[in-house]
Structures are given as structure tokens and as C-alpha cells.
């Protein structure tokens, strides 16, 4: 293999390591967001639960008040019934009857209100049960996700450590001037730094290489850059035989 091809191969190897590093870092950034979304959902459910509890508290207070009023007036009605016999005249008797009627009417209204409250309480209790179940599910899911996040982070950090050494090894075999060109591009452009040219098109920017540059590239004597995106380029067919052989190997097995 020519020196040119060997260098290209080393750069591609370096790129492979860098691409994996980028992918791992991206994954590490995305994973905590996933957990954050779950935490937000969990907080929303807790807020909804608190709202239900507040409503229930209010409903129970109302129910307690109504129960008290109903009991009080029932007692008054009972007392009035007993006093009815002691009415000294018809006028007083009618007045007492009217008062009892009013209290009975009021209590019937309270009973109605009370049963409406009871229905609402049942609805809220059902909602509370549902939300509690959901919260429980969320809690275990959140715990599971946090644990797996921690495991994944540790795994990723370990892999990054390995890749760091691999990167040093891969970079070590690239001649310093070529390596500094690679690093220069890496610091300025979005990955990848080195890309194949297939059918005359740069796979970094998807624009055609000018014919003169393409002829130069096919000669395979010096490392060229895409005139459009400045990424390092190589002709895919310089490596096609090897890759084709690899493909065949895979197909057979
Ligand atoms: Zn390009």
C-alpha cells in the first residue's frame, strides 16, 4: 500500500474513533433530558394530586358544616313539635307550624346539597385513586430510568476512556503535519473531518468535486481537501476492493 493510502487509512481510523466519541457524548447529553421529562411529568401529577386533595378537603368541610346544620335543625324541629301542644292560641300555633315548615324545607335543601357533595366526593376519590396509581407507576419508572442512566453514564465514561487511548494510538501513526491539518478542520467544522468522494461527489457537503481536483484525487498522491467544504477527501474506489472483500466475507458467514 502506498504511503498516501496508508495515511488516508490512518485518518479514517482516527475519524472512526472521533465519530464514536461524538456519538457517545451526544447520547450522554440526551439521556438526562429523558429523565428530566419524566421528572416534569411526575411533578405535574403531584400538583394534580395536591389539587384533588385540596378540593376534597373543601368538600369534606362543607359536608361537615351541612351535617351539623341538619342535626341542629332536626333537634329544633323535634323541640318545636313538643312545644306545639303548649301553644296558647291558634295564631301562635300557626306561627310555630310555619317556623317548623321552614326549618324542614331548609333541611331538605341541605340534604340535597349534601348528596350532591357526596357525589362530587366520590368522583374526587376515584380521581385520587387513579392519580395515586399513576404516581406509583411513575415513581418506579423514574427510579428505573435514573438507575439505568447512571449505569449508562458509567459505561459511556468507561468507553470514552478507552476511546481516548485508541485516539492517541490512531493519531500517533498519522504524520504530524497531516494530523494538525485534521485537528484544524475538526476544530472548525462539524464532523466528520475526512470523507469519501463517491461518483465525484463529496459525501461531506454533497457537492460535486471540480473535474481537475477529481483527477488529482484519483491519482492518490497527496491528501486533498474538498474545495467546497474543506474536509479532507479520498476517492472511495481506492478502498473499494478491500471493503468489497469484507462485504463478501460477511455475506458468506
Ligand atoms: Zn465537501
Image (cartoon, helix red, strand yellow):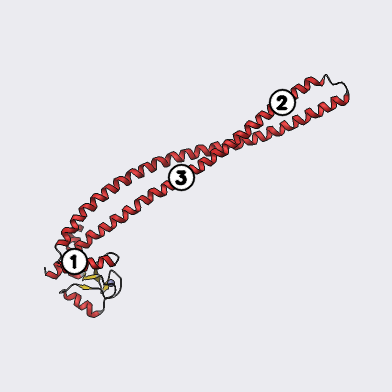
The residue drawn where x is 88% and y is 26% is: 91
Query: In the figure, 162 relative to 231: above or below?
Result: above
Chain-order first, disc 3 or disc 2: 3
Camera-nearest label, 1 or 2? 1
Q: Residues within 10 Å of mark 2 (few under 14, many from 20)?
A: some
**Which image quadrant for residue 231?**
bottom left
- Alpha carbons under labels 1 and 2: distance apart: 96 Å
Tell me, yes or no, whether the two marked residues, 3 and 1, touch with CB atoms within 8 Å. Answer: no
Q: Position of residue 130 (x, y in %)?
A: 50, 39
Chain-order first, disc 3 or disc 1: 3
How many discs mark residues in the rendered view?
A: 3
Q: Position of residue 41 (x, y in %)?
A: 45, 47
- Alpha carbons under labels 3 and 1: distance apart: 50 Å
Query: In the figure, 150 relative to 107: above or below?
Result: below
Which quadrant of the frame does ligand 1 lie within? Answer: bottom left
**Which numbered marker is on residue 43?**
3
Q: Which residue is mark 2?
A: 74
Q: Which residue is mark 1?
A: 179
Q: Position of residue 81 (x, y in %)?
A: 78, 22
Chain-order first, disc 1 or disc 2: 2
Q: Residues within 10 Å of mark 1 (few under 14, many from 20)?
A: some
The residue drawn where x is 15% and y is 58% is: 169
Amino acid at each position: 500500500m502506498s504511503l498516501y493510502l496508508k495515511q488516508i487509512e490512518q485518518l479514517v481510523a482516527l475519524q472512526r474513533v472521533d465519530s464514536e466519541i461524538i456519538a457517545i457524548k451526544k447520547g450522554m447529553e440526551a439521556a438526562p433530558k429523558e429523565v428530566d421529562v419524566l421528572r416534569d411529568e411526575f411533578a405535574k401529577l403531584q400538583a394534580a394530586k395536591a389539587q384533588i386533595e385540596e378540593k376534597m378537603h373543601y368538600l369534606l368541610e362543607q359536608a361537615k358544616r351541612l351535617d351539623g346544620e341538619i342535626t341542629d335543625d332536626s333537634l329544633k324541629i323535634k323541640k318545636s313539635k313538643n312545644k306545639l301542644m303548649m301553644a296558647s292560641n291558634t295564631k301562635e300555633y300557626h306561627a310555630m307550624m310555619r317556623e317548623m315548615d321552614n326549618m324542614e324545607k331548609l333541611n331538605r335543601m341541605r340534604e340535597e346539597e349534601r348528596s350532591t357533595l357526596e357525589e362530587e366526593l366520590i368522583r374526587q376519590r376515584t380521581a385520587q385513586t387513579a392519580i395515586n396509581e399513576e404516581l406509583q407507576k411513575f415513581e418506579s419508572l423514574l427510579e428505573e430510568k435514573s438507575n439505568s442512566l447512571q449505569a449508562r453514564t458509567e459505561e459511556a465514561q468507561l468507553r470514552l476512556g478507552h476511546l481516548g487511548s485508541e485516539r492517541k494510538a490512531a493519531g500517533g501513526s498519522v504524520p504530524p503535519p497531516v494530523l494538525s491539518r485534521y485537528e484544524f478542520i475538526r476544530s472548525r467544522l462539524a464532523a466528520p473531518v475526512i470523507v469519501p468522494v463517491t461518483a465525484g461527489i463529496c459525501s461531506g457537503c454533497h457537492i460535486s468535486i471540480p473535474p481537475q481536483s477529481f483527477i488529482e484525487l484519483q491519482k492518490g498522491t497527496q491528501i486533498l481537501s474538498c474545495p467546497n467544504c474543506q474536509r479532507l477527501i479520498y476517492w472511495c474506489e481506492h478502498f473499494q476492493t478491500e471493503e468489497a472483500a469484507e462485504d463478501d466475507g460477511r455475506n458468506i458467514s
